[in-house]
Amino acid sequence: MPRKLELTFQKGADGRSGRWRKKHNGKVYYLGTGRSKSDRDSYQKALTKWRELQEELDARRADEPKPYDAEYDELIRHWELVLSWSVQHDQEGEASDARNKLEELRERRSRNNQPPTDRSDVHPSQFRFDLELPPDVQAKIRRRSMALSESDATEIYDEITRRPPISEEDRIDLSSLNAIKEERVRWEDRLESQAVLMSRSECDSVSGWTQLYLELHRKRVEAGELSAGRYQKIQTCVDFFVAWYGKSTAVATIDGRTLARLHSHLLELVSKDACAPGYANDRLREVRSLIRWLWEQDAVEKLPKNIDSRGLRIARKASTPQTFTVGEVEKLIRTSSGRARLWILLGLNCGMTQRDISDLQNSQVNWLNGQITRKRSKTQKHESVPTVTYKLWPETHQLLKELRSGGERVLVNRNGQPLLQEYVDDSGKYKKNDNIRNAYNRLLTKAGLSKSFKLLRKTSASLLDNHSTFRGLGELFLGHAPRTVAQRHYIQTTDTALDDAVDYLRSHLHISQAVAKPKEIPAEE
C-alpha cells in the first residue's frame, strides 16, 4: 500500500467489515467495505469509485452558477466589442489591452472562489462621472419627509461646512474631466455601432466560422479520419486565435496583416517564456490552415500573400534531448511490478507510447517466437511508415503472456476497456482517460523521478544512435518514416540488425538485473 492513503478506513464494530470513506467539501462519502487498512484490493476498488465520483462532483460543481457570473459575462461581452472594434480599425494598443483584460476576466470567472468584479474591470465607455456627496450626507438628504425642517436643514448645512476644505492637490481638473467624458462618449458610439454590426452579421464573425470549422473536424473524428487527440490540438490552437482576434470580429477582415500581427504576438510570448517555440509554431500552422479553409469557403476574399512566408516562422531553441539514465531505468523497474512494469518494458523494448500499448492487437504478437510486428498507431495509415518487427526481451515476453487479456486487444484495464480512451463528446469537448499515465505518474512519485513516459522510447533510440554499430537504427526503432533519399532508396536494414540492437539495449540498461532485484519501494499498480 502507498505510504499516504487518499481514503480513510473506518473500522467495523461487532465483527462487521470496515468502510472506506472520503470527506470532501464538508460531506462524507462511503466507498465500499474492506477487511482492514492494509486490504489492498478493497482500497483500489474504493479509490477507483472515489475518482469516478469526484469527477462527477467536479463536473456538477462546474455547472453550478457562481455569484458573480452575470457581472463577469456582461464585462466580457463589453470587452469583446472593444477588441472587435480595435482589431477592425487597426488600433493594436487598445486591442492588446482588451485581450489582457479578457484573459484576466475569464480566469477569475472560472475560479471556484470567484472574486467580485471591481471598477478596474470596467471599460472607460462604462464609466460614470457624476459627482456624489458623502454617503452620510446623502442619507440625510434622502429622508422621505414632506419637507425639511429648519433644524434638519441647519444640521445638513453644518455637516457639509464642517468638512475640511479640499487641498490644491486634491482638486479636480475639470478640463481633464471633460476630456475623459468626451472619450467615454466616443467609445459609447463606437461600441454601439459595433454591437449593431455584429448582430446583423453574427454568422460572418470569427466565432461563427470557427465553430463550423471545428464541427467539420468533429465529423472527421466520428468517421475515423482524425484522432480525438489531433482534434484537441486543432481546437486549442483555434480557440487561442479566436481569443486573440476577437470572437465578434468580422471574418472578412482577416488578411496578411492579421498573420503578421499574430506572428509578432507569438514571438512576444516566446520571449517572455509564456509559450514554448514548438507550441507557438503549432498555433501559427493551425491558423494558416484555418485561413486557407476560410478562403476556400469564400469567407475571406483573398488568400494572404504571406500565408507561406518563411519570415513567419518561429525558430526552435536548440536543446539536448532529455532521456533516462541507466540508474533511473533500473530504479523505475525495481520500483514497479505487474502491469506498470510491463508498460515500462514495452516502452524501452519496442519504443511504444501509451497509445501503442493500448492498441496492441493479438494478431501483431508472435507468442511462440516472442516478437511484435506492427506500425505505430499514430502513423499506421501512412504508406511511407515502416512495419517494424521487435524482438521481445524474455522479461517483456513473460509479463505479456501473463497479463494478456485473451481477446483481440492484448492489454485492457480491469473493466475490460482500452487502457487509453480519447473521444469528443456531443458538446465538442475532448475527453481522455489514460490508465497507463495515471499508474506511471504514481510510480514516478514513489521512485522520486519526474520524466514523462515517452522519454522511455527516446532513451532507447538515443542509445542506438550513439552506438558505433547501431547508429542509424534509432529512426527505425521509433517507427519513423525514412527522412533522407539514402534511407529511402539505398540503405537496407538486415532482419537481424534490429534484433542485435534490442539485445544491446537489454544488456546496457541492466534489464535482467533490475527485474531480478527486489523492489526498493512498495508499488501500487
Image (cartoon, rainbow, N blue to C red):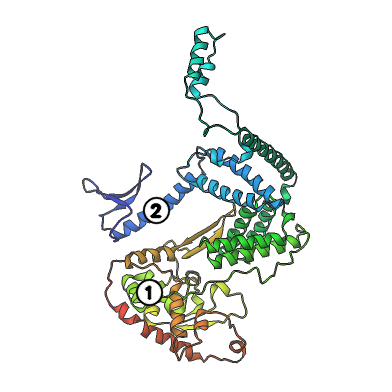
Q: Is residue 510 left or right of residue 410?
A: left
What's the amino acid at mark 2?
Answer: Lys
Q: Residues within 10 Å of mark 1 (few under 14, many from 20)?
A: few
Q: Earlier in the sequence, mark 1 or mark 2?
A: 2
Q: Nearer the viewer, residue 266 or 70?
A: 266
Q: Nearer the viewer, residue 230 or 148?
A: 148
Q: Secondary structure at mark 2?
A: helix
- Check if mark 1's residue and mark 2's residue have beta carbons within 8 Å: no
Q: Which residue is mark 2?
A: 49
Q: How many marks?
A: 2
Q: Position of residue 376 (x, y in %)?
A: 54, 75
Which numbered marker is on residue 351? Answer: none
Instruction: Please state which of the two labelled residues, at mark 1 or mark 2, is closer to the viewer.
Output: 2
Taking the spot 36% from the left edge, 76% from the top edge, the residue there is 329
Q: Quadrant of residue 436?
A: bottom left
Taking the spot 54% from the left edge, 78% from the top edge, the residue there is 375
Residue 111 shows in this picture: yes
What's the amino acid at mark 1?
Answer: Glu
Distance between the alpha carbons at the discs numbered 1 and 2: 26 Å
Furthest residue to the front? 168
Q: Residues within 10 Å of mark 2 (few under 14, many from 20)?
A: some
Taking the spot 51% from the left edge, 77% from the top edge, the residue there is 363
Q: Is residue 248 above or below residue 308?
A: above
Taking the spot 51% from the left edge, 87% from the top edge, the residue there is 472
Q: Is residue 38 left or right of residue 48?
A: left
Q: Secondary structure at mark 1?
A: helix
Which numbered marker is on residue 402? Answer: 1
Q: Is residue 186 above or below residue 432?
A: above
Q: Quadrant of the N terminus?
A: bottom left
Q: Position of residue 285 (x, y in %)?
A: 63, 66
